[in-house]
Each structure stands twice: as structure tokens, then as C-alpha cells.
Image (cartoon, rainbow, N blue to C red):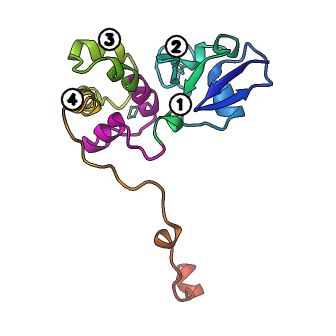
Amino acid sequence: MPKLTVNNEAIEYRMDPRTPLLWALRDASNLTGTKYGCGTGSCGACIVDVDGKAVKSCRFTLEQAEGTFVTTIEGLSRERSHPVQLALIDANVPQCGYCIPGITMAAAVLIKRERAPSEEAIAAAIDNICRCGIYPRLIDAIQRAARAMHGDERLPAGPRTGIDPREAARSVPALDPDHAAGR
Ligand code: FES
Ligand code: FES
């Protein structure tokens, strides 16, 4: 059975070794931040970090992942404080957000090795498809993230994570049933 390390946890997947890593992560590990888009290696929605490389997990089997160290969007930063995340949030890059985990992982891999990636280098490394068309703001955000990663720029802290249920909902006087029914 394939054994690998996912977000710093050693895991044995009791699944067919031909299973794409994407489905092991989503279905067995409940790491649903990694998205399924095309399933053919074209869109990049499923990108995770495997041993420091951006890998399309829909086309990468558990057998291939044996012994590797995998980082998913959940493992990148629990507080959404990775420079790529802060730069994307600060520039309001995400629209529907579906492509964002894959783009974030690909960008995180890129800026680890590139201090000042050019537009061309970003276009070559991030071939992800975004149906919302975020590309112009994305290039700028990744360049800012690279500067922040290497200490050349400070990014504003992102929003608080999670919702405090005491703030999200509160008790109110009982509703008038006629009003609630629209009468
Ligand atoms: S779902 Fe893997 S590249 Fe599209
Ligand atoms: S933000 Fe919607 S697909 Fe990219």
C-alpha cells in the first residue's frame, strides 16, 4: 500500500496504487482544498507540491507518490499567511476562487526558487486556467509575493481566518409567525 507524507503526516493509503493522488487527498484524507477541474492535466486546479515541484495530482498516481512529501493548500499555511496568499488577498485577485488553490501552490513553488520572477517566467510556470480571467492582477501579485518571500517587501496581514459563531449568529426575540410566513 502506498505510503507518503502529506502535510507533515505519514499516511498509508489503503487504495489501488493506480488511484490519482487527487482522489486520495480529497476522498481519503478529506483535503478538499485541492480541486478537480479537467482531470486531463490541462487546468492546474489540482496542483500540489510534491517534493518541491508543482504536480498536477489528477495525473499523478499514488504509486508515483510513494515515499514523497506532499503539501496541499491546507498544509501551506494554516493561517493563510503565506506570501502568495497575502498578495492574492491584498490585490483582490480571487473571483469565484475555484482555480486559486492550484494557482497558489504553483506560485508558492515558483517563488521559493525565484526572487524576482519576470512576467514571462510566471506565465511559463503558472499555466493554470482561470475561467474568471484574473491573469493581469495575478502576475503583479505573484511578483509582490516573491519580494515578500525574500524580505524585499512587506505585505499587509490578511483577514482573520474562521468565523466566530458568537459573532456570526445571535439570538433575537421570537419571530412573529405571520410575519415569517409572509402574511
Ligand atoms: S484537474 Fe488536474 S489539471 Fe485539471
Ligand atoms: S477565480 Fe474563478 S476560475 Fe479563477
Q: CA distance from mark 2 to mark 1?
A: 17 Å
Q: Which mark is residue 72?
A: 1
Mark 1 in CB contact with mark 3 (< 8 angstroms): no
Which residue position holds label 4? 140
Q: CA distance from mark 3 to mark 4?
A: 15 Å
Chain-order first, disc 2 or disc 4: 2
Q: Residues within 10 Å of mark 3 (few under 14, many from 20)?
A: few
The kind of secondary structure element at disc 1 is: loop
Q: Give the answer, above or below, for where 67 lies relative to 6.
A: above
- Which amino acid, by three-letter code, is at mark 2? Gly
Chain-order first, disc 3 or disc 4: 3
The mark lying in front, picked from 2 and 3, is 3
**Residue 162 location (% of width, % of height):** 48, 56
Q: Is residue 98 magenta?
A: yes
Residue at 30% of width from left, 49% of height from top? 157
Q: Is residue 51 magenta?
A: no
Q: CA distance from mark 2 to mark 4?
A: 25 Å
Residue at 47% of width from left, 35% of height from top? 76
In the image, the residue with mark 2 has its CB under 8 Å from the nearest atom of ligand 1? yes
The mark lying in front, picked from 2 and 4, is 4
Q: Which residues are magenta?
A: 78-106
**Residue 183 location (% of width, % of height):** 54, 83
Q: Residues within 10 Å of mark 1 (few under 14, many from 20)?
A: many
Q: Residues within 10 Å of mark 4 (few under 14, many from 20)?
A: some
Q: Nearer the viewer, residue 95 or 10?
A: 10
Q: Which mark is residue 124?
A: 3
Residue at 68% of width from left, 15% of height from top? 66
**Residue 37 location (% of width, % of height):** 53, 25
- Which amino acid, by three-letter code, is at mark 4? Asp
Chain-order first, disc 1 or disc 4: 1
State ligand 2's quadrant.
Answer: top left
**Residue 81 sits in quarter:** top left
